[in-house]
């Protein structure tokens, strides 16, 4: 089939997930045209032909929180200049590619193309869980306004798709039809990683030069392999039990696969990888980012790790380290058969789309 595939560029999780789906589609001889924004364009262009750059919504982060005012202004200004390019790319695809079906990972332009041309449309992402599932009160507590705002935005983003595939390591009750839950989509490097029991903590932080965090990590008694605290490193720097790492994807994945536990933000991709590799995680979501709060609180609810609003109190990390055996016992029961479940469902959906029975 000819498939139009859209990828939102906010964060890299969408691009990493879409890469797996796209590789599957290409390997099954489908012809794919890709529309993407932000960093997703460069990431996907290295692996696929036919990647079109479009303007997409983005967020501005400062001091570990979303800056709503700056984000709104940047999107308005960027949208004014990006809209003509989006329309040009839109009509170019209409005249040259003629897709038969559309798949969107939270991307609006491909969704609009499907709706205006009455094409089958499939949504694949992790965000729709906020709108299409029932979330328990302990997950929302203290963040009701952010939850309602996020839910309203997601509800308006891709309404009335033919089906919604939601990737998740937790399973809230589904409240809307045409909705299916699947385990996180994992890149091949994670599936092929050499998972083993280690005695170091993997720490991934955007808090450059956070000395209070560094002092707390010294007290854990574990070797800490730290990414992000010192940027532009040419090689590893060692300071006692702290090992500051230059970024390397292969090294990062191996440090993850061989770690005892992980300390990082509330992003879904790394959290899903940690759960799959059965590594306890201390998750610190960005302020004003309900999706990350959701991930972190469900991580704690499932017993796979701990949620923390911040790391200001050294006791947060020290208590997490002390409880690692409890988290490891819960994670030992987590199983996932790679990406087999979601890719099988994707093939079935495409068969129905091609047969015209959706």
Image: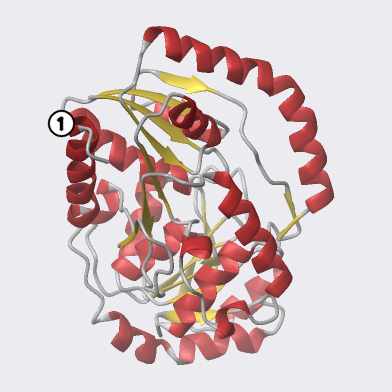
Residue 240 seen anywhere in this rendered image of the structure: no
Residue 167, by quadrant, is bottom left
Residue at 17% x, 62% y is 337
Image location of residue 206, percent across then percent down: 63, 56
Count of numbered marks: 1
Q: Which residue is mark 1?
A: 28
Q: Is residue 88 left or right of residue 20?
A: right
Q: Nearer the viewer, residue 354 or 318?
A: 354
Residue at 22% x, 28% y is 26
Image location of residue 230, percent across then percent down: 63, 54
Residue 330 seen anywhere in this rendered image of the structure: yes
Residue at 17% x, 32% y is 355
- Height in image: 79 above or below 67? above
Image location of residue 300, percent across then percent down: 48, 82
Image location of residue 239, percent across then percent down: 57, 66
**Which quarter of the rendered picture does the N terminus lie within?**
top left
- Height in image: 220 above or below 181? below
Q: Is residue 245 left or right of residue 228?
A: left
- Height in image: 69 above or below 214? above
Q: Nearer the viewer, residue 158 or 34?
A: 158
Q: Give the structural element (helix, strand or loop) at label 1.
A: loop
**Which quarter of the rendered picture does the C terminus lie within?**
top left
């Amino acid at each position: 089939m000819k498939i139009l595939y859209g990828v939102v560029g906010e964060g890299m999780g969408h691009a990493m997930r879409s890469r797996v789906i796209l590789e599957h589609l290409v390997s099954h001889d489908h012809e794919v045209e890709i529309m993407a924004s932000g960093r997703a364009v460069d990431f996907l262009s290295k692996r696929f032909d036919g990647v079109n750059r479009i303007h997409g919504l983005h967020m501005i982060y400062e001091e570990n929180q979303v800056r709503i005012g700056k984000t709104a202004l940047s999107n308005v200004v960027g949208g004014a200049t990006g809209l003509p390019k989006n329309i040009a790319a839109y009509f170019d695809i209409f005249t040259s590619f003629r897709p038969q079906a559309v798949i969107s990972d939270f991307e609006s332009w491909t969704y609009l193309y499907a709706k205006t041309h009455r094409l089958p449309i499939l949504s694949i992402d992790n965000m729709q869980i906020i709108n299409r599932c029932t979330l328990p009160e302990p997950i929302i507590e203290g963040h009701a306004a952010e939850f309602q705002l996020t839910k309203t935005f997601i509800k308006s983003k891709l309404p009335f798709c033919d089906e919604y595939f939601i990737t998740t390591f937790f399973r809230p009750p589904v409240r809307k039809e045409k909705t299916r839950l699947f385990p996180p989509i994992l890149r091949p490097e994670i599936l092929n990683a050499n998972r083993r029991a280690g005695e170091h903590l993997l720490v991934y932080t955007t808090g450059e030069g956070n000395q209070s965090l560094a002092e707390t990590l010294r007290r854990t008694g574990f070797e800490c392999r730290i990414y992000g605290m010192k940027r532009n490193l040419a090689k590893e720097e060692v300071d006692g039990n702290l090992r500051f790492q230059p970024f390397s994807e292969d090294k990062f994945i191996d440090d993850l696969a061989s770690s005892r536990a992980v300390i990082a933000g509330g992003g879904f991709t790394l959290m899903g990888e940690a759960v799959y590799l059965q590594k306890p995680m201390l998750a610190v979501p960005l302020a004003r980012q309900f999706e990350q709060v959701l991930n972190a609180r469900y991580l704690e609810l499932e017993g796979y790790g701990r949620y923390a609003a911040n790391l200001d109190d050294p006791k947060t990390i020290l208590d997490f380290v002390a409880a690692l055996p409890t988290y490891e016992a819960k994670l030992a029961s987590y199983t996932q058969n790679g990406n087999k479940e979601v890719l099988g469902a994707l093939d079935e959906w495409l068969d129905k789309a091609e047969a015209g029975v959706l």
